[in-house]
Amino acid sequence: MTKTALITGITGQDGSYLAELLLSKGYEVHGIIRRSSSFNSGRIIHLFEEVQNPDAKFHLHYGELTDGTRLEKLIEKVEPDEFYNLGAQSHVRVSFDEPVYTADVVGLGTLRTLEAIRNAGGAQTVRFYQASSSEMFGLVQEVPQSETTPFYPRSPYACAKVYSYWQVVNYREAYGLHASNGILFNHESPRRGETFVTRKITRGLARILAGLDDKLYLGNLDAKRDWGFAGDYCDAMWRMLQQDTPDDYVIATGETWSVKDFLRKCFERVGLNWEDYVEFDPRYLRPSEVELLIGDPSKARKQLGWTPKTSFDDLVKMMVDSDLEDHKQLHRIVS
């Protein structure tokens, strides 16, 4: 029997990789997208184009995490076996500028989704995945961070994610919903948004090599993160919803690297010294910084059978090479 999945945030990095994974497993995949006057489906257009037939297994629907009524109607229409909530205002620095909007989409958006599932009669039939975040640990209380580490959020985004996390736990315990939190540490790819620091670095390097920019401006270079590949982490999301019992899991590599480390490896990939091209810009500092995040994925390894397949060096290579190729293609088109 074909399973059906409904995904919020399907046009994002994680949503696109998850959709590919589920389609490869024979799922019928439905994605919720926001109405926009400009195209915002670049990461999934290849999936949409491949299924232009009456028996298509990939479908898109308009909806918003700010509209609980619409979410409920979509759940009633699609009748998903699995619901993956990946939608968010996910940029931590932006959340300081847009705290109310971030709380509405990230925090209340999760609550609206949980209520929509319950009101649509799906509490006993729908399996729910919530994209939680390592940012919830913030000012870390222990190293490494595990499922039992206390939260200490340091941004509006992180505070909203903590609210979402506990709502998921509450609906699991109060209504018997098969709901799991994936506490994902930083996960990157060539599909990462261009304002996130890893992609900003790889794209900036490509622009410097193409002669379009002379410098790359960044904030805190000493922040340390546990970086993995988004495609690997989407496999962990799926594994959570295949378990008989819902639970919460840290998904991480167990390694930590600084922004400076990432910079150095990227520029070394093309034979350059990053210090010749990077300048500090205080505009990119957060009002309250998170200096160190490193996860303990032992529970996911033991209970889900999950381990990351992509090394940090391979991730750097993948992202640098992708942006270099994109700029080569652009140069060919322009010239």
Image (cartoon, helix red, strand yellow):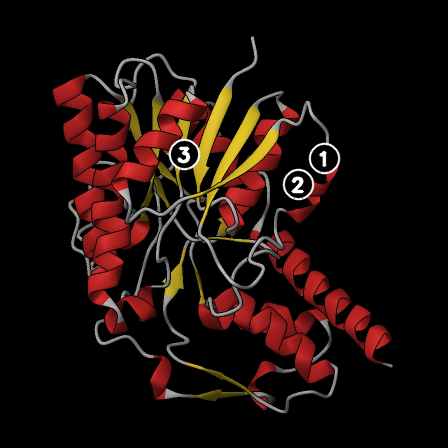
Question: Which amino acid, mark 1?
Answer: Gln
Which residue bears the numbered disc 3? Answer: 84
Q: Nearer the viewer, residue 248 or 139?
A: 248
Q: CA distance from mark 2 to mark 3?
A: 19 Å
- The answer to whether the residues at label 2 and label 1 have Cβ atoms under 8 Å apart is yes
- Mark seen at residue 52: 1
- The answer to whether the residues at label 2 and label 3 have Cβ atoms under 8 Å apart is no
* Residue 58 in which image quadrant: top right
Sequence-wise, the earlier of marks 2 and 3 is 2
**Can the viewer see residue 299 in this picture?**
no
Q: Find numbered disc 3 in the image and state the secondary structure of the residue it sits on.
A: strand
Q: Which tag is nearer the camera, tag 1 or tag 3?
A: 1
* Horizontal side, residue 163 vs residue 130: left or right: left
In percent of the image, x 59 and y 44: which residue is there?
Answer: 310
Which residue bears the numbered disc 2? Answer: 48
Place of residue 113 in the rendered image (x, y in percent of width and height, measured from the top left) = 28, 36
Question: Which amino acid, mark 3?
Answer: Tyr
Q: Find numbered disc 2 in the image and state the secondary structure of the residue it sits on.
A: helix
Residue 224, above or below 120: below
Alpha-carbon neighbours of circle 1 within 10 Å: few (<14), some, or many (≥20)?
few
Residue 273, above or below 161: below
In percent of the image, x 21 and y 52: which residue is there?
Answer: 160
